[in-house]
Amino acid sequence: MDPFTFPPLAALLNAASVALAGLTDLLSPAVGTTAGALAVVLVTLLVRAVLIPAGVSQARSEQARARLTPRLRELRRRHGKDPERLQRETLDLYRAEHVSPFAGMLPTLAQAPVLGLLYAIFVRSEIAGRANPMLEHDLFGAPLGTSLAQLLVTGGGPATAFLVYGALLATLVVVAELSRRLLQPVQDGSPVSPGMRLLTGALHHLTAVVALFVPLAAALYLTVSGAWTLGQRLLLRRRHPLDAAA
């Protein structure tokens, strides 16, 4: 079932499409055929700028959790054999210290509707009964509404299109690896198995896998947003260092 058949969501999709097309038309005289891609980048930057407070909240929460690590380990030592008691005591500790264990999810959850709208715009040939003008735009020969998987299956597109996708995927992989190495998550004292460490490391690269199958516009959003996340979190880690909290 297509959720955008629901009238309020259909109206939201139409408004987002009109706004993005208007921004693209505004940029076209200055940047020509790359206007659509630049519009997506500007939207991404705007969304991330609005979410800066959520990023700050995430950094503060990580610092607070690092400060609480010794007490969390003590709770695990005392109540490790009683999972329900351990969970209750842990939540009580977070509540008493005004720490949200879910603060780190805020930036990702807040972006989900925007990414969903962007994806919906670039997979539809028509929106509100009109031809979708955004599908006419490309980035150096790579259509904004086509995924790398589609190009590989059809075998179409100029060589520059594959270079564009390759550059985006390479950037996503580098960002993911730097995030894995430089932004280790705060541990709450619970034991972490080698398998869990491997799974956590693989999850950093999940975005690159997703980018293979979504339209180029969505992959562009993921790339810019991922680079922003890495830079922002590194800066905030310097302002709210975990070692100082510990």
Image: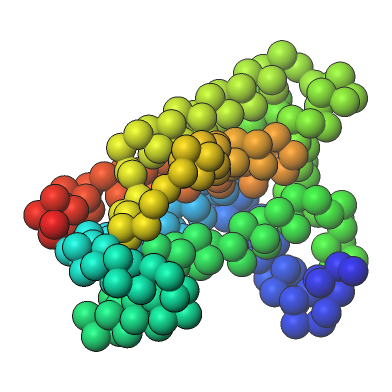
Residue 31 visible from this viewpoint: no
Residue 136 point in image, percent of width and height: 77, 41
Outermost residue, top direction?
A: 159
Which residue shows up at 14% across the image and 50% down it?
A: 243
* 163 on left or right of 125: left
In the image, residue 93 lies at what x, y percent? 27, 80
Relative to 121, is 214 above or below? above
- From the viewer's perspective, tell me whether residue 159 is left or right of residue 150: left
- Tell which residue pokes out farthest to the left in this image: 244
Q: Nearer the viewer, residue 149 or 15?
A: 149
Q: How is the image coloured?
A: rainbow
Q: How many marks?
A: 0
The relative height of residue 19 versus residue 206 in the rendered view (above or below) is: below
User: Where does the image place residue 197, in percent across and percent down from the top left?
Assistant: 46, 41
Give 170 or 32, whichever is nearer the viewer: 170
Q: Is residue 129 above or below residue 151?
A: below
Q: In this view, which residue lies farthest toward the front?
A: 81
Q: Is residue 193 left or right of residue 90?
A: right
What residue do we see at 26% from left, 45% from top?
234
Residue 169: quadrant of the picture: top right
Q: Nearer the viewer, residue 143 or 86?
A: 86
Image point (30%, 66%), residue name: 77
Q: Looking at the rendering, which quadrant does residue 36 occupy?
A: top right
Say whether residue 74 is visible: yes
Q: Residue 139 at what x, y percent from top left?
A: 64, 31
Residue lying at 31% horizontally and 58% vertically, measured from the top left = 189
Task: State which quarter of the image contains the N terminus.
Answer: bottom right
The answer to whether residue 9 is left or right of residue 60 is: right
The quarter of the image holding the C terminus is bottom left
